Image: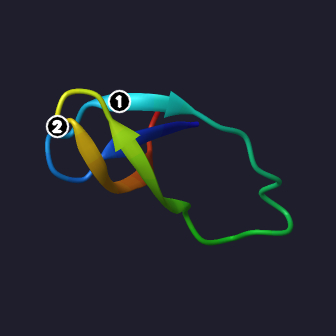
Amino acid sequence: MVLACSECKRKNYRVSRNKKLTAEKLELKKYCAACRKHTIHKEGKT
C-alpha cells in the first residue's frame, strides 16, 4: 500500500498492514519532501 500526501497528493511511502485486524485506512503524520514539512499521509491505491 502507498501513503500519499494530503496536500500535494504525491506518493511518498510504502507500508504494509494486516487487513484482517485493521479495517480502516491508515492516516499517519509523515514528512513530505515536496512540501518540506510534516503533513497527514493517507493510504491510497497502489
Percent of width and height locating residue 25: 55, 63
Number of marks in the image? 2
Which quadrant: the N terminus? top right
The image quarter containing residue 4 is: top left
- Mark number displayed over residue 41: none
Residue 35's mark?
Answer: 2
Real-space CA distance between mark 2 and mark 1, rounded to the nearest whole angstrom:
12 Å
Left or right: where does residue 32 sit relative to residue 28? Answer: left
The amino acid sitting under disc 2 is Cys
> Which residue is pictured at 75% across the width and 69% down the height?
22
Amino acid type of the residue tagged 1 in the rendering = Lys
Q: Residue at x 38, y 42 (%)?
A: 31
Q: Position of residue 27 (x, y in %)?
A: 48, 63
Q: Residue at x 85, y 69 (%)?
A: 21
Question: Measured along the vertical axis of the image, is residue 41 above or below residue 31?
Answer: below
Q: Which residue is mark 1?
A: 11
Query: Which of disc 1 and disc 2 is earlier in sequence?
Result: 1
**Callout 2: few (<14), some (14-19), or many (20+) C-alpha neighbours within 10 Å?**
few
Left or right: 19 as drawn, with respect to 7: right
Q: Residues within 10 Å of mark 1 (few under 14, many from 20)?
A: some
* Residue 15 placement (x, y as % from top left): 65, 37
Q: Is residue 16 left or right of residue 31?
A: right
Residue 5 falls in image quadrant? top left
Q: On screen, 1 above or below 34? A: below
Could you tell me which secondary element the residue under label 1 belongs to?
strand
Quadrant position of residue 33: top left
